[in-house]
Amino acid sequence: MALRRKIDSNETSLYYAEEISIGVLPPNPVWKPLEPNSYSDFGGELTLLARNPINRSRQRKKGAITDLDASGGFNQDFTQSNLQDMLQGVMFADFRRKSEADIIEVTGTAFVVSDASAFPVGAIVHASGFSVPGNNGIKTVTAIGGSPETDIEVAGLTAESPVPENARVVVVGMTSASGAVDVDASGDLPILTGVPTEIASSLIPGEWIFVGGDGGTAFTNEVNNGFKRVKSVSGNDVTIDLSQTTMVTEAGSSAISIFVGRVLKNELGSLVKRRSYQLQRQLGAPDDASPDAVQSEYLVGAIPNEFTLNIQQADKINADLTFVAIDNEQLTAAEGVKDGDYQALVETDAFNTSSDFAMLRMNIIDPAVSNPDPLFAYLTEASVTINNNVTPNKAVAVLGAFDVTAGTFEVSLEVTAYFATIEAVQAVRRNENVEVNFAVVKENAGFVFDAPLVGLGNGRLNVSQDDPITLPLTIDAATAAKINPATDYTCLWVFFDYLPNLANPE
């Protein structure tokens, strides 16, 4: 045995596994890796109360451990995939997913899944996780085969066995028949008519889509392409209440591609889902002779409390997360880490704030205008904070907590904008109804964040010699039901597994 005198921080790693009930792991938990840049705190803070009786010696007596506060927090870069799963815990909700499935087998003509009935012929699918490069990427479903239906038939496949554990196929959109989709901009809000049923029927109010593909599958008028927000759906007609550009009437002369993603928003009633996790921090091997005998510590019954997305100029987008837990555990190297399926990290690049923003908007809401004038042209910095206001539940005979209570779901933003017109300051004073949304795209994938109703605060101009005038704002988001009863949520995310080159920031 060669016990070490120290262990460096670079030898640590962080994983998480979802519990089946608070404090209880499933029989074979799936441990997913995280990528912390730093920790704000992690572990258990014990409360020691000394005995201090009145006595002639004026000395205290040894006390007792009376309480434990377990919590943790870390910062990590925000990528396309590394926080999607955890965001469900932050939002107390499940993703509203389009068709997606794990791959069982790849033949020369088809992806084999357990049930292919949800993958319509003509759908654009995105395949990922395969060892054979040609099996990854965008494919079009040509037929559904097998009995029962298990084969998603597409062109250009190579048989692959065994199939990698994380191989998946996801519906990311559909291309219409030639001339089927038009734009009717004759009313207050533009309408996409003739949208394929498989896409139109999957959309919900407030969801963002991307209109227009590569290779001639886009509208001739460029303003009709791009990110669009769905107000309502009636049959094959999709009404758009927010667009990157002012749309115009157009009879589509070609096939039009429409791309969709998975939607995550704070839900109501029975759709609210609280998740709890165990966070595992591996702390290295204390014995050089046994490098695989790793010691570890755990946050047990951990509930996501606060999430902050940080957007600074000339920087990477990163996120801070904090958790409130019911307990803290430590395992020695001899005991080893907890059992389970330890997944490998899927490598993805971080988003950067200089070149990956395809859309960044803040405007006064006008229900009759789909492309209102923005309040600002540029921001110097921004942050989005989601707070679940989680508090631990303490009780006699319990060291730590037996459960937690989630408080009000709060979404707030802080931005600093370059001042251009006094109307922006007046909008704060008038307490205007405002909306904030942005889209980030990198390497043909990305996400949209939308807060459909916010109020503005602060608004005191910052005037400094030799510098541009800036306007700091504090922003509180609220349910947008007063704007549209169907948008009864505070914030919404859409993650696109694939976006065409047309979506790339200019």
Image: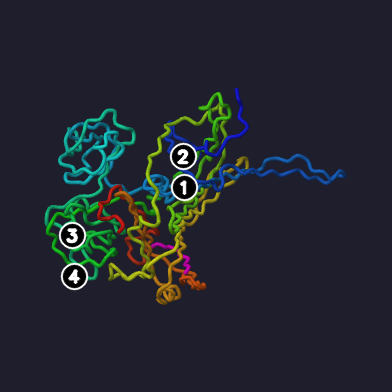
Task: Give the left or right position of residue 494, taking residue 156 as reference.
Answer: right
Labels 4 & 2 near each other (Cβ < 8 A) = no
Give the quarter of the image for residue 8: top right
| x and y, in percent, of residue 270 in the image | 38, 50
> Element at badge 1?
strand
Instruction: Tell me how far mark 4 sits from mark 1, CA to CA.
Output: 47 Å
- Picture disc at residue 76: 1
Instruction: Tell me how far mark 3 sits from mark 2, CA to CA.
Output: 44 Å
Instruction: Indicate yes or no whether the magenta region holds residue 476.
Output: yes
Q: Earlier in the sequence, mark 1 or mark 3?
A: 1
- Comparing 417 with 149, the one in front is 417
Give the quarter of the image for residue 240: bottom left
How many residues crowd around disc 1 within 10 Å: few (fewer than 14), some, or many (20 or more)? Answer: many
Kind of residue at badge 2 = Tyr
Give the residues in magenta: 471-479
- Comparing 450 with 499, the one in front is 499
Q: Earlier in the sequence, mark 3 or mark 2?
A: 2
> Element at badge 3?
loop
Instruction: Indicate yes or no whether the magenta region holds residue 176.
Output: no
Q: Earlier in the sequence, mark 4 or mark 3?
A: 4
453 in relation to 329, above or below: below
- Picture disc at residue 16: 2
